[in-house]
Image: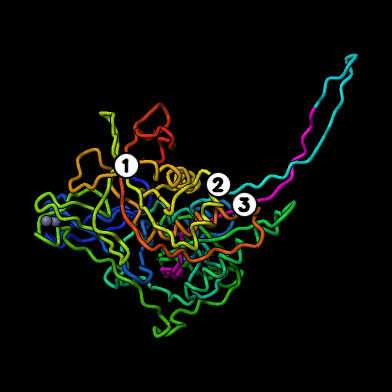
């Protein structure tokens, strides 16, 4: 057994194209080194939603004893000898997104004034407050035929259980894979409607509350269940047992036998495949560093290699001049030049201190979107006051680019919307597509001062230590 305790996120098993070994990776990791043959590998995610499978860890016999234990606890007769056990894989959609919440509330405040002769006067007034929060959002929902006995969601299991890419070979012969009947567009629509309903639960004290999903990404997860049917004195009795934990998720008495194969395979949706390729410089074929990044400089030929290209991306990379500290870390930022029409709007949103035609976004990932927003705001204000030189080699001070350009473009949209909402308490604004006119990558030096990284040039931009991982 491999120890998963030190890892976070979900795990995916893939095969090394170099030696055929089985490899395990975390979902967000797209570069890994094969321990058997030393090949550096890169995972390419598909354009359409991929499908994964969570293998059962309980055998048929174990599933039945879990069912019996459950029945015994409820003082019910145990499963009979004529028991029939079917095994299914139920499909679930997993949706990951960024969620923006705007909550307008009114707080009553009291101020006490000491008056002459010792008397006190209590003055109360109301203060309008707008809480805005950006957070990571993740949910699972059944993708199969409507069924009250099978759980509608697998909840947190989608974040800690090991998964493998779905393929026919991965499905044991005695398991039946149930078809995906709900298109993912419909699931996302339902999620959006669900989040919109959150606004009604918490009505706004003024203006409008808003809950908005950005950049939803879908994948399918097949989860194993045992269906245990036997005849009792109350007719046909059916138990559904979770194939991983062994817990009983439903018990029905006096039911009809379950119809299997009710749907023909033509309704099945097509899934994307994860490709595994060698992680090499496209110019000279030399292995690229095995570090997780979207941007590399080849150690051998010094060519700049970007895993994601964009027509607006400028050629070179810049770094801020004036790193004074030995232990500076150079953090990457996406610098996006705004069209003239947007400059004024962004300036107004970001406040008077903002004096630039560029929006600067962190090029490293964090689940703390609210902090990324604040850092982006501070960096956008500070960047025009710094000087830059072009660089052609990364040393150990340079941090990897873990937020891709496509993710950054979505973040830019979220950030502009987040700033707009902050100015209007959520009233009358919709997100707009953000169209920069030029994009470049730049690095700025920061050093650690207790719990914060402080920029080493202006000493004006700070962010929490844990944001950088
Ligand atoms: Zn290998
Ligand atoms: Zn090269």
Q: Main secondary structure of the magenta part?
A: strand
In this view, the mark in front (2 or 3): 2
Ligand 2 image position (quadrant): bottom left
Crowdedness near tag 1: few (<14), some (14–19) or many (≥20) residues, C-alpha within 10 Å: few
User: Cα distance, mark 1 to mark 3?
Assistant: 31 Å
Q: Are marks 2 and 3 in contact (CB under 8 Å)?
A: no
Is 100 included in the stretch rendered in magenta?
Answer: yes
**Residue depicted at x 18% and y 51%:** 297
Give the residue pinned by disc 1: 387
Q: 196 or 111: which is nearer to us? A: 111
Disc 3 designates what residue? 423
Q: Which mark is residue 351?
A: 2
Mark 2 or 1, nearer chain start: 2
Residue at left 38%, top 53%? Answer: 161
* Some atom of ligand 2 lies within 8 Å of the CB belonging to the residue at label 3: no
* Alpha carbons under labels 2 and 3: distance apart: 10 Å
């Amino acid at each position: 057994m491999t120890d998963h305790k030190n890892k976070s996120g979900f795990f995916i098993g893939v095969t090394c194209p170099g030696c055929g070994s089985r490899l395990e990776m975390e979902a967000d990791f797209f570069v890994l080194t094969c321990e058997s043959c030393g090949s550096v590998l890169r995972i390419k995610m598909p354009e359409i939603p991929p499908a994964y499978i969570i293998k059962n860890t309980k055998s048929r016999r174990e599933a039945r004893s879990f069912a019996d234990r459950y029945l015994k606890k409820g003082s019910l007769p145990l499963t009979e000898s004529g028991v029939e056990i079917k095994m299914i894989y139920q499909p679930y959609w997993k949706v990951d997104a960024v969620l923006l919440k705007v909550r307008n509330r009114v707080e009553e405040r009291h101020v006490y004034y000491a008056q002459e002769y010792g008397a006190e006067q209590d003055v109360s007034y109301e203060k309008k407050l707008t809480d805005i929060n950006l957070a990571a959002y993740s949910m699972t929902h059944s993708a199969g035929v409507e069924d009250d006995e099978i759980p509608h969601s697998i909840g947190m299991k989608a974040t800690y259980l090991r998964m493998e890419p779905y393929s026919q070979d991965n499905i044991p012969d005695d398991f039946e894979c149930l078809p995906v009947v709900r298109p993912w567009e419909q699931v996302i629509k339902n999620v959006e409607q669900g989040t919109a309903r959150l606004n009604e639960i918490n009505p706004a004290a003024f203006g409008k509350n808003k809950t908005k999903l950005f950049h939803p990404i879908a994948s399918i997860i097949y989860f194993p269940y045992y269906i245990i049917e036997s005849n009792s004195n109350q007719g046909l009795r059916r138990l559904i047992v979770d194939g991983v934990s062994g817990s009983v998720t439903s018990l029905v008495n006096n039911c009809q036998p379950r119809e299997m194969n009710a749907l023909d395979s033509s309704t099945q949706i097509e899934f994307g495949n994860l490709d595994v390729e060698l992680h090499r410089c496209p110019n000279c074929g030399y292995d690229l560093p095995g570090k997780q990044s979207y941007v590399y400089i080849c150690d051998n030929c010094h060519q700049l290699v970007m895993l994601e290209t964009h027509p607006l991306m400028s050629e070179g990379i810049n770094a801020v001049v004036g790193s004074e500290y030995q232990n500076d870390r150079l953090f990457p930022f996406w610098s996006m030049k705004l069209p003239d029409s947007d400059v004024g709007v962004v300036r107004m949103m970001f406040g008077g201190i903002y004096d630039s035609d560029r929006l600067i976004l962190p090029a490293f990932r964090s689940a703390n979107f609210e902090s990324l927003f604040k850092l982006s705001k501070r960096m956008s204000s500070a960047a025009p006051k710094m000087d830059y030189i072009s660089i052609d080699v990364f040393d150990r001070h340079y941090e990897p680019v873990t937020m891709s350009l496509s993710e950054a473009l979505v973040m830019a949209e979220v950030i502009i919307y987040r700033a707009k909402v902050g100015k209007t308490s959520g009233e009358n604004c919709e997100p707009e597509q953000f169209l920069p006119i030029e994009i470049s990558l730049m690095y700025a030096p920061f050093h650690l001062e207790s719990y914060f990284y402080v920029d080493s040039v202006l000493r004006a931009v700070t962010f929490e230590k844990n944001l950088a991982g």
